[in-house]
Amino acid sequence: MSLKDKDPAVYGAIEAEVKRQENSLEMIASENYTSAEVLEATGSRLTDKYAEGYPGRRYYGGCGHVDTVENLAVERAAKLFGAEHVNVQPHSGTQANIASYLALLEPGDTVMGMDLSCGGHLTHGHPLNFSGRFFRIIPYGVRKDNQFIDYDLIRETALKEKPRMIICGASAYPRIIDFERFSEIASEAGAYLLADIAHIAGLVAAGAHPDPVNCCDIVTTTTHKTLRGPRGGMIMCRKNFASQVDRSVFPGNQGGPLMHVIAAKAVCFGEALKGEYKDYIRRVIANSRELAARLSEGGIDLVTGGTDNHLILADLRSLGLTGREAEALLQEAGIIVNKNTIPYDPEKPLVTSGIRIGTPVLTTRGMGPEEMREIAGIILSVLRDRDPQKGSGRSASLAASFPAPR
Ligand SMILES: *Cc1c(COP(=O)(O)O)cnc(C)c1O
Protein backbone atom coordinates (compact mmCIF):
# COMPACT_ATOMS: atom_id res chain seq x y z
CA MET A 1 0.00 0.00 0.00
CA SER A 2 2.71 2.47 0.95
CA LEU A 3 4.83 1.80 -2.14
CA LYS A 4 2.20 3.61 -4.17
CA ASP A 5 2.85 6.83 -2.22
CA LYS A 6 6.51 6.45 -1.39
CA ASP A 7 7.80 5.31 -4.77
CA PRO A 8 5.17 5.88 -7.44
CA ALA A 9 7.67 5.28 -10.27
CA VAL A 10 8.36 1.65 -9.29
CA TYR A 11 4.78 1.11 -8.12
CA GLY A 12 3.43 2.34 -11.44
CA ALA A 13 5.64 0.00 -13.44
CA ILE A 14 4.59 -2.97 -11.29
CA GLU A 15 0.90 -2.12 -11.67
CA ALA A 16 1.31 -1.74 -15.44
CA GLU A 17 2.95 -5.17 -15.63
CA VAL A 18 0.16 -6.75 -13.55
CA LYS A 19 -2.39 -5.24 -15.98
CA ARG A 20 -0.42 -6.48 -18.97
CA GLN A 21 -0.44 -9.99 -17.50
CA GLU A 22 -4.18 -9.78 -16.86
CA ASN A 23 -5.07 -8.48 -20.30
CA SER A 24 -2.97 -10.78 -22.45
CA LEU A 25 -2.89 -14.50 -23.12
CA GLU A 26 0.50 -15.49 -21.71
CA MET A 27 1.78 -18.56 -23.57
CA ILE A 28 5.49 -18.47 -22.76
CA ALA A 29 6.24 -22.10 -21.89
CA SER A 30 8.61 -21.27 -19.02
CA GLU A 31 6.19 -19.00 -17.14
CA ASN A 32 3.37 -19.56 -14.68
CA TYR A 33 1.24 -17.74 -12.09
CA THR A 34 2.17 -18.53 -8.50
CA SER A 35 -0.51 -18.84 -5.84
CA ALA A 36 -1.23 -15.97 -3.46
CA GLU A 37 0.43 -18.06 -0.71
CA VAL A 38 3.68 -18.53 -2.68
CA LEU A 39 3.66 -14.79 -3.39
CA GLU A 40 3.07 -13.98 0.29
CA ALA A 41 6.05 -16.07 1.39
CA THR A 42 8.22 -14.50 -1.33
CA GLY A 43 7.30 -11.05 -0.09
CA SER A 44 7.93 -11.89 3.57
CA ARG A 45 10.45 -10.54 6.11
CA LEU A 46 12.60 -13.62 5.56
CA THR A 47 14.27 -11.58 2.83
CA ASP A 48 16.09 -9.75 5.64
CA LYS A 49 17.83 -12.79 7.16
CA TYR A 50 21.42 -13.87 6.51
CA ALA A 51 21.78 -17.64 6.83
CA GLU A 52 25.00 -18.79 5.14
CA GLY A 53 25.45 -22.51 5.71
CA TYR A 54 22.81 -25.21 6.16
CA PRO A 55 20.18 -25.94 8.86
CA GLY A 56 21.95 -26.63 12.14
CA ARG A 57 25.30 -25.51 10.64
CA ARG A 58 24.95 -21.77 10.02
CA TYR A 59 27.56 -19.04 10.08
CA TYR A 60 25.12 -16.54 11.64
CA GLY A 61 23.03 -16.38 14.80
CA GLY A 62 19.27 -16.19 14.94
CA CYS A 63 18.72 -18.90 12.32
CA GLY A 64 16.27 -21.15 14.21
CA HIS A 65 13.15 -20.20 12.27
CA VAL A 66 14.78 -20.13 8.87
CA ASP A 67 16.17 -23.60 9.70
CA THR A 68 12.56 -24.74 10.18
CA VAL A 69 11.65 -23.27 6.81
CA GLU A 70 14.58 -24.82 4.94
CA ASN A 71 13.99 -28.23 6.55
CA LEU A 72 10.34 -28.10 5.46
CA ALA A 73 11.35 -27.26 1.90
CA VAL A 74 13.89 -30.10 1.79
CA GLU A 75 11.53 -32.69 3.31
CA ARG A 76 8.68 -31.79 0.98
CA ALA A 77 10.88 -31.80 -2.14
CA ALA A 78 12.35 -35.17 -1.17
CA LYS A 79 8.84 -36.59 -0.82
CA LEU A 80 7.60 -34.98 -4.05
CA PHE A 81 10.41 -36.36 -6.22
CA GLY A 82 11.50 -39.40 -4.19
CA ALA A 83 14.98 -37.91 -3.79
CA GLU A 84 17.56 -39.06 -1.21
CA HIS A 85 19.18 -35.64 -0.90
CA VAL A 86 17.92 -32.16 -1.80
CA ASN A 87 19.57 -28.74 -1.86
CA VAL A 88 16.99 -25.94 -2.10
CA GLN A 89 19.46 -23.04 -2.01
CA PRO A 90 20.35 -22.42 -5.70
CA HIS A 91 19.13 -18.95 -6.65
CA SER A 92 18.17 -20.09 -10.16
CA GLY A 93 18.25 -22.99 -12.58
CA THR A 94 21.53 -21.69 -13.96
CA GLN A 95 23.15 -21.66 -10.52
CA ALA A 96 21.88 -25.18 -9.84
CA ASN A 97 23.66 -26.26 -13.02
CA ILE A 98 26.88 -24.39 -12.22
CA ALA A 99 26.98 -26.05 -8.79
CA SER A 100 26.37 -29.49 -10.32
CA TYR A 101 29.16 -29.07 -12.88
CA LEU A 102 31.48 -27.98 -10.06
CA ALA A 103 30.43 -30.98 -7.96
CA LEU A 104 31.26 -33.57 -10.62
CA LEU A 105 33.90 -32.04 -12.90
CA GLU A 106 37.23 -30.25 -13.21
CA PRO A 107 37.61 -27.35 -15.65
CA GLY A 108 38.48 -28.66 -19.10
CA ASP A 109 36.59 -31.95 -18.69
CA THR A 110 34.53 -33.17 -21.63
CA VAL A 111 30.74 -32.75 -21.39
CA MET A 112 28.03 -33.81 -23.83
CA GLY A 113 24.97 -31.54 -23.87
CA MET A 114 22.02 -30.88 -26.13
CA ASP A 115 22.62 -28.16 -28.69
CA LEU A 116 20.75 -24.92 -27.94
CA SER A 117 19.32 -24.80 -31.46
CA CYS A 118 17.88 -28.31 -30.99
CA GLY A 119 16.14 -27.42 -27.72
CA GLY A 120 18.95 -27.48 -25.13
CA HIS A 121 19.73 -24.68 -22.66
CA LEU A 122 22.57 -22.11 -22.60
CA THR A 123 24.00 -23.87 -19.54
CA HIS A 124 24.32 -27.13 -21.50
CA GLY A 125 27.42 -25.88 -23.30
CA HIS A 126 26.81 -22.66 -25.22
CA PRO A 127 30.17 -21.06 -26.07
CA LEU A 128 29.23 -17.76 -24.38
CA ASN A 129 28.02 -19.49 -21.19
CA PHE A 130 30.26 -20.63 -18.27
CA SER A 131 29.58 -24.20 -19.42
CA GLY A 132 31.01 -23.62 -22.86
CA ARG A 133 33.91 -21.53 -21.61
CA PHE A 134 35.20 -23.84 -18.87
CA PHE A 135 34.46 -27.27 -20.29
CA ARG A 136 35.11 -29.08 -23.57
CA ILE A 137 31.61 -29.41 -25.00
CA ILE A 138 30.50 -32.05 -27.48
CA PRO A 139 26.96 -31.07 -28.50
CA TYR A 140 24.32 -33.58 -29.51
CA GLY A 141 21.07 -33.00 -31.33
CA VAL A 142 17.89 -34.50 -32.66
CA ARG A 143 17.25 -36.69 -35.69
CA LYS A 144 16.95 -34.77 -38.93
CA ASP A 145 14.08 -36.96 -40.18
CA ASN A 146 11.66 -36.82 -37.20
CA GLN A 147 13.28 -34.29 -34.80
CA PHE A 148 13.23 -36.74 -31.86
CA ILE A 149 16.36 -37.04 -29.67
CA ASP A 150 18.89 -39.20 -31.51
CA TYR A 151 19.79 -41.77 -28.83
CA ASP A 152 21.76 -44.01 -31.20
CA LEU A 153 24.00 -41.15 -32.30
CA ILE A 154 24.40 -39.99 -28.68
CA ARG A 155 25.58 -43.48 -27.71
CA GLU A 156 28.00 -43.65 -30.61
CA THR A 157 29.40 -40.18 -29.80
CA ALA A 158 29.65 -40.93 -26.08
CA LEU A 159 31.60 -44.16 -26.68
CA LYS A 160 33.98 -42.28 -28.97
CA GLU A 161 34.43 -39.02 -27.00
CA LYS A 162 34.37 -40.54 -23.50
CA PRO A 163 32.75 -37.50 -21.80
CA ARG A 164 33.13 -37.12 -18.03
CA MET A 165 29.47 -36.08 -17.92
CA ILE A 166 26.38 -36.16 -20.11
CA ILE A 167 23.71 -33.57 -19.46
CA CYS A 168 20.16 -34.29 -20.61
CA GLY A 169 17.02 -32.17 -20.43
CA ALA A 170 15.80 -29.30 -22.57
CA SER A 171 14.08 -25.93 -22.82
CA ALA A 172 12.31 -26.50 -26.10
CA TYR A 173 11.68 -30.20 -26.67
CA PRO A 174 8.02 -31.21 -26.92
CA ARG A 175 8.48 -34.95 -26.29
CA ILE A 176 9.18 -37.39 -23.44
CA ILE A 177 12.87 -37.61 -22.56
CA ASP A 178 14.01 -41.21 -22.07
CA PHE A 179 16.16 -40.85 -18.93
CA GLU A 180 16.62 -44.65 -18.65
CA ARG A 181 18.11 -44.73 -22.12
CA PHE A 182 20.45 -41.85 -21.24
CA SER A 183 21.41 -43.72 -18.08
CA GLU A 184 22.35 -46.87 -20.03
CA ILE A 185 24.44 -44.77 -22.43
CA ALA A 186 26.17 -42.92 -19.58
CA SER A 187 27.09 -46.12 -17.72
CA GLU A 188 28.36 -47.77 -20.91
CA ALA A 189 30.52 -44.70 -21.61
CA GLY A 190 31.64 -44.32 -17.99
CA ALA A 191 30.11 -40.82 -17.73
CA TYR A 192 28.17 -39.08 -14.98
CA LEU A 193 24.59 -38.26 -15.91
CA LEU A 194 23.03 -34.91 -15.02
CA ALA A 195 19.32 -34.44 -15.78
CA ASP A 196 18.05 -30.88 -15.95
CA ILE A 197 14.26 -30.96 -15.56
CA ALA A 198 13.79 -27.16 -15.31
CA HIS A 199 10.85 -27.21 -17.72
CA ILE A 200 9.18 -30.52 -16.93
CA ALA A 201 9.64 -30.61 -13.13
CA GLY A 202 5.90 -30.17 -12.57
CA LEU A 203 5.15 -33.05 -14.95
CA VAL A 204 7.69 -35.27 -13.18
CA ALA A 205 6.29 -34.32 -9.75
CA ALA A 206 2.77 -35.17 -10.89
CA GLY A 207 3.81 -38.51 -12.39
CA ALA A 208 3.08 -37.32 -15.94
CA HIS A 209 6.66 -37.72 -17.17
CA PRO A 210 9.26 -40.45 -16.32
CA ASP A 211 11.22 -39.54 -13.17
CA PRO A 212 15.00 -39.16 -13.60
CA VAL A 213 15.78 -39.10 -9.88
CA ASN A 214 16.47 -42.84 -9.62
CA CYS A 215 18.57 -43.26 -12.75
CA CYS A 216 20.65 -40.06 -12.84
CA ASP A 217 23.57 -39.00 -10.64
CA ILE A 218 22.28 -35.46 -10.17
CA VAL A 219 18.97 -33.82 -11.10
CA THR A 220 18.62 -30.03 -11.32
CA THR A 221 15.51 -27.95 -11.78
CA THR A 222 13.97 -24.54 -11.56
CA THR A 223 10.98 -24.07 -9.26
CA HIS A 224 9.17 -21.37 -11.26
CA LYS A 225 8.20 -23.08 -14.51
CA THR A 226 5.61 -25.92 -14.58
CA LEU A 227 6.23 -26.44 -10.85
CA ARG A 228 4.52 -23.07 -10.24
CA GLY A 229 6.71 -21.89 -7.38
CA PRO A 230 8.92 -18.84 -6.79
CA ARG A 231 11.78 -17.97 -9.16
CA GLY A 232 14.61 -20.28 -8.07
CA GLY A 233 16.56 -23.51 -8.49
CA MET A 234 17.07 -26.85 -6.73
CA ILE A 235 19.40 -29.87 -6.86
CA MET A 236 18.52 -33.48 -6.07
CA CYS A 237 20.94 -36.37 -5.82
CA ARG A 238 21.76 -39.67 -4.15
CA LYS A 239 23.40 -39.62 -0.71
CA ASN A 240 26.84 -40.34 -2.19
CA PHE A 241 26.97 -36.94 -3.92
CA ALA A 242 25.27 -35.00 -1.09
CA SER A 243 28.32 -33.36 0.47
CA GLN A 244 29.91 -32.55 -2.91
CA VAL A 245 26.69 -30.91 -4.08
CA ASP A 246 26.18 -28.94 -0.86
CA ARG A 247 29.76 -27.67 -0.89
CA SER A 248 29.44 -26.66 -4.55
CA VAL A 249 26.36 -24.55 -3.82
CA PHE A 250 27.80 -22.96 -0.67
CA PRO A 251 30.60 -21.90 -0.46
CA GLY A 252 31.25 -23.04 -4.06
CA ASN A 253 29.20 -20.55 -6.01
CA GLN A 254 26.78 -18.73 -3.69
CA GLY A 255 26.78 -16.80 -0.44
CA GLY A 256 23.70 -16.34 1.71
CA PRO A 257 20.56 -18.23 0.61
CA LEU A 258 17.35 -16.34 -0.25
CA MET A 259 15.32 -17.51 2.74
CA HIS A 260 12.10 -15.79 1.61
CA VAL A 261 12.33 -17.71 -1.66
CA ILE A 262 13.11 -20.96 0.16
CA ALA A 263 9.96 -20.40 2.27
CA ALA A 264 8.01 -19.94 -0.95
CA LYS A 265 9.59 -23.11 -2.37
CA ALA A 266 8.32 -24.99 0.71
CA VAL A 267 4.82 -23.61 0.08
CA CYS A 268 5.03 -24.57 -3.61
CA PHE A 269 6.14 -28.16 -2.80
CA GLY A 270 3.28 -28.42 -0.30
CA GLU A 271 0.86 -27.40 -3.06
CA ALA A 272 2.40 -29.83 -5.56
CA LEU A 273 1.95 -32.73 -3.12
CA LYS A 274 -1.82 -32.26 -3.26
CA GLY A 275 -4.16 -34.11 -5.61
CA GLU A 276 -5.37 -30.90 -7.25
CA TYR A 277 -1.88 -30.26 -8.57
CA LYS A 278 -1.82 -33.64 -10.37
CA ASP A 279 -5.10 -32.67 -11.94
CA TYR A 280 -3.67 -29.28 -12.96
CA ILE A 281 -0.75 -30.96 -14.74
CA ARG A 282 -3.10 -33.40 -16.51
CA ARG A 283 -5.03 -30.37 -17.80
CA VAL A 284 -1.81 -28.59 -18.88
CA ILE A 285 -0.89 -31.58 -21.07
CA ALA A 286 -4.43 -32.10 -22.39
CA ASN A 287 -4.54 -28.41 -23.37
CA SER A 288 -1.16 -28.62 -25.07
CA ARG A 289 -2.27 -31.70 -27.06
CA GLU A 290 -5.54 -30.03 -28.06
CA LEU A 291 -3.78 -26.87 -29.21
CA ALA A 292 -1.18 -28.91 -31.13
CA ALA A 293 -3.87 -30.94 -32.89
CA ARG A 294 -5.84 -27.85 -33.94
CA LEU A 295 -2.74 -25.93 -35.14
CA SER A 296 -1.54 -28.87 -37.13
CA GLU A 297 -5.03 -29.43 -38.61
CA GLY A 298 -4.93 -25.76 -39.64
CA GLY A 299 -1.72 -26.32 -41.60
CA ILE A 300 1.03 -25.28 -39.16
CA ASP A 301 4.02 -27.66 -39.09
CA LEU A 302 4.95 -28.78 -35.58
CA VAL A 303 8.44 -29.92 -34.64
CA THR A 304 8.21 -33.74 -34.05
CA GLY A 305 4.64 -33.54 -35.35
CA GLY A 306 3.05 -32.87 -31.95
CA THR A 307 3.63 -32.84 -28.20
CA ASP A 308 3.74 -35.06 -25.10
CA ASN A 309 4.21 -32.22 -22.64
CA HIS A 310 3.33 -28.59 -21.85
CA LEU A 311 4.85 -27.02 -24.95
CA ILE A 312 4.63 -26.92 -28.72
CA LEU A 313 7.27 -25.81 -31.21
CA ALA A 314 5.81 -24.46 -34.44
CA ASP A 315 7.90 -24.37 -37.62
CA LEU A 316 6.64 -21.36 -39.58
CA ARG A 317 8.63 -21.75 -42.78
CA SER A 318 5.68 -23.06 -44.77
CA LEU A 319 3.77 -19.87 -43.87
CA GLY A 320 6.68 -17.75 -45.08
CA LEU A 321 7.06 -16.18 -41.63
CA THR A 322 10.05 -15.99 -39.29
CA GLY A 323 9.74 -16.53 -35.55
CA ARG A 324 10.44 -12.86 -34.95
CA GLU A 325 7.61 -11.77 -37.24
CA ALA A 326 5.17 -14.27 -35.74
CA GLU A 327 6.05 -13.23 -32.16
CA ALA A 328 5.34 -9.59 -33.03
CA LEU A 329 2.07 -10.33 -34.87
CA LEU A 330 0.77 -12.47 -32.01
CA GLN A 331 1.80 -9.92 -29.40
CA GLU A 332 -0.23 -7.31 -31.23
CA ALA A 333 -3.14 -9.73 -31.15
CA GLY A 334 -2.76 -10.18 -27.37
CA ILE A 335 -1.01 -13.57 -27.38
CA ILE A 336 2.48 -13.65 -25.86
CA VAL A 337 4.87 -16.35 -27.12
CA ASN A 338 8.61 -16.43 -27.83
CA LYS A 339 10.45 -16.86 -31.08
CA ASN A 340 12.47 -20.05 -30.91
CA THR A 341 14.95 -21.86 -33.10
CA ILE A 342 13.77 -25.08 -34.66
CA PRO A 343 16.27 -27.95 -35.05
CA TYR A 344 18.93 -27.07 -37.67
CA ASP A 345 17.35 -23.62 -38.06
CA PRO A 346 18.59 -21.69 -41.10
CA GLU A 347 17.82 -18.36 -39.36
CA LYS A 348 19.85 -16.54 -36.69
CA PRO A 349 18.83 -16.83 -32.97
CA LEU A 350 17.27 -13.33 -32.95
CA VAL A 351 15.19 -14.16 -36.03
CA THR A 352 14.50 -17.95 -35.95
CA SER A 353 12.03 -20.02 -37.94
CA GLY A 354 9.79 -20.99 -35.06
CA ILE A 355 7.77 -20.05 -32.02
CA ARG A 356 7.42 -21.91 -28.74
CA ILE A 357 3.92 -22.04 -27.24
CA GLY A 358 3.13 -23.29 -23.74
CA THR A 359 -0.07 -23.97 -21.81
CA PRO A 360 0.94 -23.80 -18.08
CA VAL A 361 -0.17 -20.17 -17.49
CA LEU A 362 -3.55 -20.33 -19.22
CA THR A 363 -4.31 -23.65 -17.53
CA THR A 364 -3.63 -21.96 -14.18
CA ARG A 365 -6.16 -19.32 -15.27
CA GLY A 366 -8.69 -22.12 -15.70
CA MET A 367 -8.81 -22.51 -19.47
CA GLY A 368 -9.57 -25.89 -21.02
CA PRO A 369 -9.78 -27.59 -24.43
CA GLU A 370 -12.59 -25.34 -25.65
CA GLU A 371 -10.48 -22.22 -25.09
CA MET A 372 -7.50 -23.94 -26.75
CA ARG A 373 -9.59 -24.46 -29.89
CA GLU A 374 -10.50 -20.77 -29.84
CA ILE A 375 -6.84 -19.77 -29.35
CA ALA A 376 -5.72 -22.06 -32.18
CA GLY A 377 -8.25 -20.30 -34.39
CA ILE A 378 -6.87 -16.89 -33.40
CA ILE A 379 -3.26 -17.94 -33.98
CA LEU A 380 -4.11 -19.44 -37.37
CA SER A 381 -5.99 -16.41 -38.66
CA VAL A 382 -3.40 -13.92 -37.36
CA LEU A 383 -0.45 -15.80 -38.83
CA ARG A 384 -2.04 -16.88 -42.11
CA ASP A 385 -3.38 -13.41 -42.93
CA ARG A 386 -0.58 -11.50 -41.13
CA ASP A 387 -3.34 -9.46 -39.51
CA PRO A 388 -3.32 -8.98 -35.72
CA GLN A 389 -6.70 -7.21 -35.84
CA LYS A 390 -8.22 -10.63 -36.64
CA GLY A 391 -7.44 -11.78 -33.09
CA SER A 392 -7.13 -8.91 -30.66
CA GLY A 393 -10.82 -8.64 -29.74
CA ARG A 394 -11.20 -12.40 -29.29
CA SER A 395 -8.10 -12.74 -27.13
CA ALA A 396 -9.07 -9.76 -24.96
CA SER A 397 -12.48 -11.27 -24.25
CA LEU A 398 -10.92 -14.66 -23.41
CA ALA A 399 -8.48 -12.93 -21.03
CA ALA A 400 -11.38 -11.09 -19.38
CA SER A 401 -13.39 -14.30 -18.91
CA PHE A 402 -10.49 -16.10 -17.16
CA PRO A 403 -9.04 -13.58 -14.70
CA ALA A 404 -5.41 -13.94 -13.67
CA PRO A 405 -4.83 -14.42 -9.94
CA ARG A 406 -4.19 -11.03 -8.29
C1 LIG B 1 15.00 -22.28 -17.65
C2 LIG B 1 16.07 -23.30 -17.72
C3 LIG B 1 17.25 -23.18 -16.95
C4 LIG B 1 17.66 -21.93 -16.23
O1 LIG B 1 16.85 -21.39 -15.33
P1 LIG B 1 17.08 -19.87 -14.81
O2 LIG B 1 16.36 -19.91 -13.51
O3 LIG B 1 16.50 -18.99 -15.85
O4 LIG B 1 18.55 -19.66 -14.64
C5 LIG B 1 18.16 -24.23 -16.98
N1 LIG B 1 17.93 -25.32 -17.73
C6 LIG B 1 16.84 -25.45 -18.48
C7 LIG B 1 16.64 -26.71 -19.27
C8 LIG B 1 15.87 -24.44 -18.52
O5 LIG B 1 14.81 -24.58 -19.32
Image (cartoon, grey):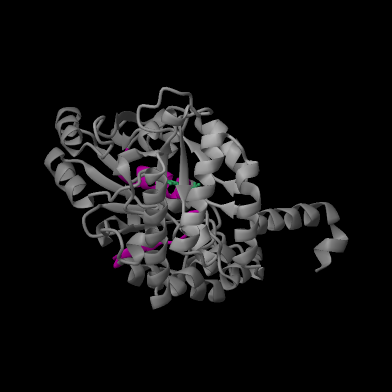
User: Is residue 363 left or right of 173 when viewed as pictured?
Assistant: right
The number of numbered badges drawn on the structure is: 0
Q: Quadrant of the N terminus?
A: bottom right
Q: Nearer the viewer, residue 103 or 288?
A: 288
Q: Quadrant of residue 145?
A: top left
Instruction: Give whichever of 217, 315 is nearer the camera.
Output: 315
Identify whether 57 is placed above or below 319: below
Is residue 341 located in the magenta-colored stretch of the structure?
Answer: no
Q: Residue 300: percent from the left, percent from the top?
A: 41, 39
Q: Which residue does the image show at 66% across and 69% down from the upper left?
A: 45
Farthest residue to the left: give it: 188
> Where is the C terminus found, in terms of image quarters?
bottom right
Residue ID at (53%, 42%): 381
- Tell me the residue at 69%/58% (across/down): 18
Q: Position of residue 376 (x, y in %)?
A: 48, 50
Q: Is residue 224 visible?
A: no
The residue stretch that appears in magenta: 82-105
Q: Nearer the viewer, residue 154 or 286?
A: 286
> Is 71 positioned to the left or the right of 237 in the image?
right
Residue drawn at point x = 28 percent, y = 36 percent:
147
Where residue 223 appears, as percent x and y from the top left, is 47, 59
Q: State whether residue 368 is above or below residue 145.
A: below
Relative to 22, is 257 on the left or the right?
left
Vertical arrangement, residue 33 with respect to residue 354, above or below: below
From the viewer's side, name the closer residue of 54 and 219: 219
* Residue 94 painted magenta: yes
Query: Is residue 136 visible in the rendered structure shown here?
Result: yes
